[in-house]
Image: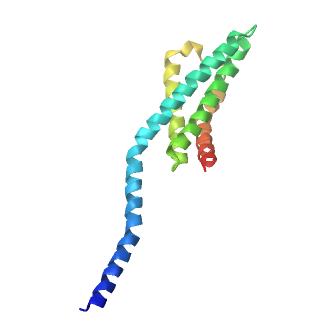
Amino acid sequence: MTIKSATKTSRNTAKRRSKAAPAARRQQEAASSASDFPKKALKAFLITIAVGAGLILLCSLIAYFMPDPDPMIHPLAYAAAALTALIGGIVAGKIHGSAPAICGLLNGLLLLALMLLLSLFFRSLASGYSAWISALLHAAVPLLSFAGAIIGVKHTR
């Protein structure tokens, strides 16, 4: 083997390695992002809960300063829930970035599960809507979170 052919062989090997390196790097990034997914999902959900608490406080203050707050309690509560789901979806989409559909739906489903769990303890304060309307309002939570995640990802690009 001559020096010229050995140099050519080493260049070809280096080219193959450089082509394989980005693929391996992408696999490592995918594996690390998969292991970070639960942490990011928890972070997004905690931010969503904080946003929801702030919106409930704001709606409570609005209702408190009204002359007759009774007719506004249910619309303000549903507006707070809808805005919480939408803003939580936007936050989840920005945190995850790569999988907005999954993170938005997961965030919305976690929020819906929390709402249903809390409704077990505060049963007497449940709305007077029919079962179908109540089911549609509850189904809107994951859908709004999904839409928020899509908006959050599109807004960051």
Among all residues in the image, which is located at the extreme top? 67
Q: Is residue 127 visible?
A: no
Scheme by which the image is coloured: rainbow
**Residue at x 38%, y 71% (from the top left corner):** 18
Of residues 58 and 116, the one drawn nearer to the viewer in this rendering:
58
Q: How many marks?
A: 0
Could you tell whether 126 is left or right of 120 in the image? right
State the image coordinates of residue 19 (x, y, percent, origin top left).
Answer: 40, 72
**Residue at x 50%, y 19% (from the top left corner):** 120
Give above or below for 67 relative to 147. Answer: above
**Residue at x 57%, y 27% (from the top left corner):** 51
State the image coordinates of residue 104 (x, y, percent, origin top left).
Answer: 54, 41
**Residue at x 38%, y 50% (from the top left corner):** 32
Give above or below for 65 relative to 27. Answer: above
Q: Is residue 34 visible?
A: yes
Quarter of the image containing the N terminus? Answer: bottom left
Could you tell whether 128 is left or right of 32 in the image? right
Among all residues in the image, which is located at the extreme bottom? 2
Among all residues in the image, which is located at the extreme right? 67
State the image coordinates of residue 15 (x, y, percent, origin top left).
Answer: 38, 76
